[in-house]
Image (cartoon, rainbow, N blue to C red):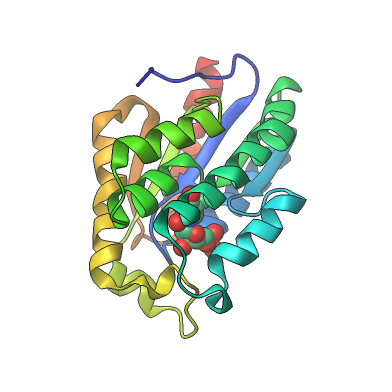
Amino acid sequence: MSEGVYADSGLFVCFEGGEGGGKSTQSRLLHDWLVEQGRTVLLTREPGGTEVGQELRRIVLSPETGELSHRTEALLYAADKAEHVDRVILPALARDEVVITDRYVDSALAYQGAGRDLVVSEVEQVNRWATGDLRPHVTVVLDLAPQAGLGRFTERDRIEAAGMEFHQRVRQGFLDLAAADPDHYLVLDARGTIEEIAAAVRARVQQALEER
Ligand code: TMP
């Protein structure tokens, strides 16, 4: 697999991790902080960062969908990413904006690759192809034991309902990705306070902006 493609303009930041780790809160706080500094920032998410993506999100997450072949699930998530990269992420980076996404390719590698019974390298190939192998400049992993993260939900969607062992494999999947490429990852314990985590994220993103 190639080393990946990094955009020459803009900054691409991604939040990853299991369920209930505070990704959405932290994405929003980072967005607000960057806007206060006068930056143009696009805050987006997967699945569902485009109109087609919202349809795909409904299909993959709705309990009404019921059982899906794991390959179908992987392809639906990959289709969401292809649309998101081509129509939203790349244009914003070309305009030199900061793009913050709540989940990206690592979620597919962890959930469909490590979590489901699919061959990880095949899931990776599909997702690298779908995204033109575009990689984030910084990925923040908010790490949390699934017992703690899933405890916060009473109603579970298709993925949340997949069982504790599945979610353990997902957690380990994210940690393995981060360990293999420490320059591009910041792993934070999601049990920290919102402000502690936000401060660590801001410091890492500030550093990345200075290095650009
Ligand atoms: P969330 O954005 O509310 O966390 O919900 C997205 C769910 O979809 C979450 O359970 C993780 C899962 N997911 C995958 O399984 N594969 C993917 O590629 C992405 C982006 C998300």
Q: Residue at x 49, y 27 (%)?
A: 137
Front residue (pair 132, 25): 132
Q: Position of residue 171 (x, y in %)?
A: 29, 55
Q: Is residue 75 left or right of residue 152?
A: right
Say which quadrant the N terminus sits in.
top left
Q: Position of residue 108 (x, y in %)?
A: 43, 47
Residue 198 seen in the current view: no
- Count the marks: how many? 0
Residue extending furthest toward the bottom = 154
Q: Is residue 178 left or right of residue 138?
A: left
Decide: is 193 above or below 97.
Answer: below
Decide: is 72 above or below 131.
Answer: below
Residue 96 seen in the current view: yes
Q: Residue at x 59, y 53 (%)?
A: 47
Say which quadrant the C terminus sits in.
top right
Q: Is residue 34 left or right of residue 73?
A: right
Q: Quadrant of residue 180?
A: top left
Q: Residue at x 32, y 46 (%)?
A: 174
Q: Position of residue 70 (x, y in %)?
A: 40, 57
Q: Position of residue 12 (x, y in %)?
A: 57, 31
Q: Is residue 151 left or right of residue 48?
A: left
